[in-house]
Image: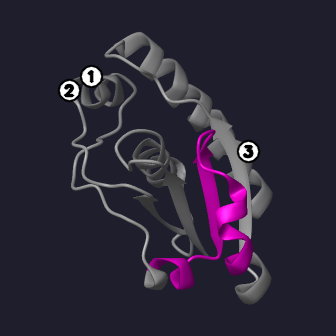
C-alpha cells in the first residue's frame, strides 16, 4: 500500500507526516512519500530542530506532485488545512484513489514548541491511520 502525504510546500506538514509514518510503520508492505503543491521553500532550522526533539529527521529536497506519484499512491492524505480536497476530485473519480483530509494548520514563525505540538498531533493521526489499515 502506498501513502502520499500532501501539503502546500512539502517543507513541514507533509514532510513531517512522511517521517513519522516511516518511524512508526513496521509493515514492509506499506510505503510513504510526501509532496507539496508549491515545492521549493527550504525546510527551516526550527522545523529541523522540532523534528529532532521528537526523534525524526526532516531533511531532504522538497518535491512537487506529479502524475506518476498520484498513480503510485493508494491513499492521498491531505495534511494541510489550506489545500482543498476538491483539487483531487478527478483522481478520486477516475482512478479510485482514497483521499483523506486531516486539515492540519500551518505554523507561521519559528516557534519550535508550536511545531512540536503539530508534529505530535500528526503522530496521533498516523497511529490511528496505521491501526485502521492493518
Q: CA distance from mark 2 to mark 1?
A: 4 Å
**Residue 55 visible in the current orientation:** yes
Residue at 74 percent across and 70 percent down: it is 98
91 or 132, nearer to the observer: 91
69 or 133, nearer to the observer: 69
Q: Earlier in the sequence, mark 2 or mark 3?
A: 2
Instruction: Please count the marks in the image.
Output: 3
- Residue holding disc 2: 45
Spot occupied by residue 125 in the image (x, y as percentages of width and height): 67, 40
**Quadrant of the image occupied by residue 104:** top right
Spot occupied by residue 15 in the image (x, y as percentages of width and height): 40, 48
Q: Please, is residue 93 above or below residue 112 in the view? A: below
- Residue holding disc 1: 46
Q: Kindly state the secondary structure of the residue where label 3 is placed.
A: helix
97 or 9, nearer to the observer: 9
Image mark for residue 77: none
The segment highlighted magenta reads 69-91
**Residue 134 visible in the current orientation:** no
Q: CA distance from mark 3 to mark 1?
A: 27 Å
Spot occupied by residue 131 in the image (x, y as percentages of width and height): 75, 52
Residue at 69 percent across and 43 percent down: it is 102
Disc 2 and disc 1 in contact, CB within 8 angstroms: yes
Residue at 63 percent across and 45 percent down: it is 126
Picture quarter with the C terminus: bottom right
**Quadrant of the image occupied by residue 33:** bottom left
- Badge 3 crowding class, 10 Å Cα cut-off, few under 14, some 14 to 19, many 20 or more, is few
Q: Earlier in the sequence, mark 3 or mark 1?
A: 1
- Residue holding disc 3: 128
Amino acid at each position: 500500500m502506498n501513502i502520499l502525504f500532501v501539503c502546500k510546500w512539502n517543507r513541514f506538514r507533509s514532510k513531517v507526516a512522511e517521517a513519522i509514518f516511516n518511524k512508526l510503520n513496521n509493515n514492509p508492505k506499506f510505503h510513504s512519500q510526501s509532496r507539496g503543491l508549491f515545492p521549493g521553500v527550504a525546510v527551516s532550522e526550527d522545523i529541523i530542530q522540532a523534528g529532532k526533539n521528537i526523534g525524526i529527521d526532516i531533511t531532504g529536497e522538497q518535491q512537487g506532485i506529479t502524475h506518476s506519484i498520484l498513480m503510485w499512491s493508494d491513499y492521498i492524505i491531505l495534511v494541510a488545512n489550506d489545500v482543498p480536497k476538491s483539487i483531487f476530485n478527478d483522481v478520486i473519480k477516475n482512478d479510485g484513489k482514497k483521499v483523506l483530509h486531516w486539515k492540519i494548520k500551518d505554523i507561521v514563525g519559528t516557534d519550535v514548541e508550536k511545531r512540536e505540538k503539530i508534529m505530535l498531533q500528526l503522530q496521533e493521526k498516523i497511529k490511528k491511520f496505521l491501526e485502521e489499515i492493518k
